[in-house]
Amino acid sequence: MLRTPSPTYDANAQSGNKNLGELPEWDLTDLYPSDDAAELKRDLDWLEDACRSFAADYEGKLADLTADEFLTAIHRHEKIENIAGRIMSYAGLRYYQLTTDAQRAKFLSDHQEKITIYTTPLVFFTLELNRIEDATIDALFEANADLARYKPAIRRIRAMKPYQLSDEMEKFLHDMGVVGDAWERLFDETIAGLEFEVDGEPLNIEGTLNLLTEQDRSTREAAARELAAVFAENIKIFARVHNTQAKEKEVMDRWRGMPTAQTGRHLSNDVEPEVVEALRNAVVAAYPKLSHRYYELKRKWLGLDVMQVWDRNAPLPMESTRTVTWDDAEATVMNAYTAFDPRMGEIAKPFFTKGWIDAAVKPGKAPGAFAHPTVTDVHPYVMLNYLGKPRDVMTLAHELGHGVHQVLAAEQGEMLASTPLTLAETASVFGEMLTFRRMLDNAKDNAEKKVLLAGKVEDMINTVVRQIAFYDFECKLHDARRGGELTPDDINALWMSVQAESLGPAFEFMEGYETFWAYIPHFVHSPFYVYAYAFGDGLVNALYAVYEENPDGFQDKYFDMLKAGGSKHHKELLAPFGLDASDPKFWDKGLSMISGFIDELEAMEG
């Protein structure tokens, strides 16, 4: 199936203040010189012809190809993926820079439609591939070692075999994909266009969410109430988007015969449902010793009888309001990466010097943060909304980790470079951990150490506890939608059912918080994506424990894991480290690191 690259979104992007120094912007010319470049027209023309000739050469003939012929077909298909991916990366990145610009939105939409039309003749490829007998495929792999390299990608394609529809139906659904994309764009444009006003200052959603991390409690409350008010005004649009997306998914799943709403995500993540279930159950069971315990500590630090939702990401009373300039952020992350392994610093360096990062907050720019892999013969691009809080340094470390991973995996080629989401968070969370440990080692005193530890625990709770609560919300949402249209109140009730459970008794929930599901992009762009964050955090915590216990030779094994991209299953990737994600105790190992940090914080109280 043709795959165009998409951004890897960050779960916890947060932001801060001004006077940050010179912030970098993207230079997209490595993709195309301009939106009317001759190279872009050349590639579109090539793509249309390449798709047509690929179908003419191979449709109806795949089962009869020799191993050498099959390898040629794979290489031709990869080249098509590459060119389509380059075009869509360029159109998408231009759009994310200014989502409110009608010309950019049209450019993206027009190119999505063109590529959908051009690539429709290729739908036969995966359908015919999945009709070939296992024994025939195995014989082809045995006959040609270069072809056998693609075994993991072909195995993942063939995992969809039981859920495949007729050729005609698959082509119809391929064409209809543009319609689903339009609902995603409606969500993006609505979010980017929301206007907020706090203390007389007009803000976009990034700036308003950022105020929830301000030291002044009345500012945090004003921001939370303004968010609730604006979400309430727009809640019908958000409910319509979620209802439509969930219904579209239910229809697709029903036609394909998928047993659950989550099945498609597990298949694309190349992870067994029982592994996800073990992760989910381990995290939910740990709520009392993680989030409930930490927020009880935080409640005491803040001197409150009960916490409100606007206190969840509040800085600690002993925390100074510190603005980190861009140069300082770059130095902190680069030093941490280079100290781990100079090779990592070398890979990260061009992101800062060659226009591969877009950092500033600007009106109309997409919110949050992501790393976009583009295609294997260009390089990734990182998007931030950097406003200078210490947590923004962690977001930079996170996204740069994605970038390093994507650079290293690129040598695998289009079909094998892309990692399943469950493994896509590995290098990003590891990069955060390296940066955190460096900052902790450099802490001047116990007070600074306490602030850093508390910040890391909050990030881990946001990555593990919050994301598993999100996953439970999505499971409930898709299950409920199967019973009929959901009103905004129905969705609000599902949201609140997971919030109290995950955050614990330290919290009270203001009126209006029930709408805060509305702005989470993952629910719309990538249903059930969110558990990948918890998977990645647990995996990295276990990896880091191995690194601390036995650092000799760890770097080489770690680089080999990142270079593998999507060419190996998680079991195979983790084996060199003596780890196994299918073992329920694996998740306890990861969660115990968070619990250990909370132990340290409690000990500091004594």
Image (cartoon, helix red, strand yellow):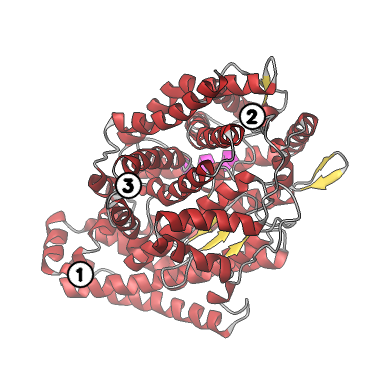
Residue under numbered circle 1: 146
Marks 2 and 1 sit apart, C-alpha to C-alpha, by 52 Å
> Which residue extends farthest right?
200
Q: Residue placed at 71% from the left, 61% from the top?
A: 21
In the figure, is residue 27 to the left or right of 511?
left
The location of residue 502, given as percent across then percent down, is 53, 24
The disc, 3 or 2, on the residue closer to the chain's N-terminal end is 3
Q: Which residues are magenta?
A: 242-249
Residue under numbered circle 2: 312
The disc, 3 or 1, on the residue closer to the chain's N-terminal end is 1
Image quadrant for the C terminus? top right
The reply to whether residue 255 is visible in this rendering is no
The location of residue 323, given as percent across then percent down, is 70, 48
Q: Residue placed at 30% from the left, 59% from the top?
A: 127
Residue under numbered circle 3: 270
The three-letter amino acid code for the residue at tag 3 is: Asp
Looking at the image, residue 93 lies above or below residue 510:
below
Task: Indicate the quadrant where residue 496 lies.
Answer: top right
Element type at mark 3 = loop
Image quadrant for the N terminus? bottom left
The three-letter amino acid code for the residue at tag 1 is: Asp
Q: Residue placed at 50% from the left, 47% from the top?
A: 438
In the figure, is residue 64 to the left or right of 302?
left
The disc, 2 or 1, on the residue closer to the chain's N-terminal end is 1
Q: Are marks 3 and 2 in contact (CB under 8 Å)?
A: no
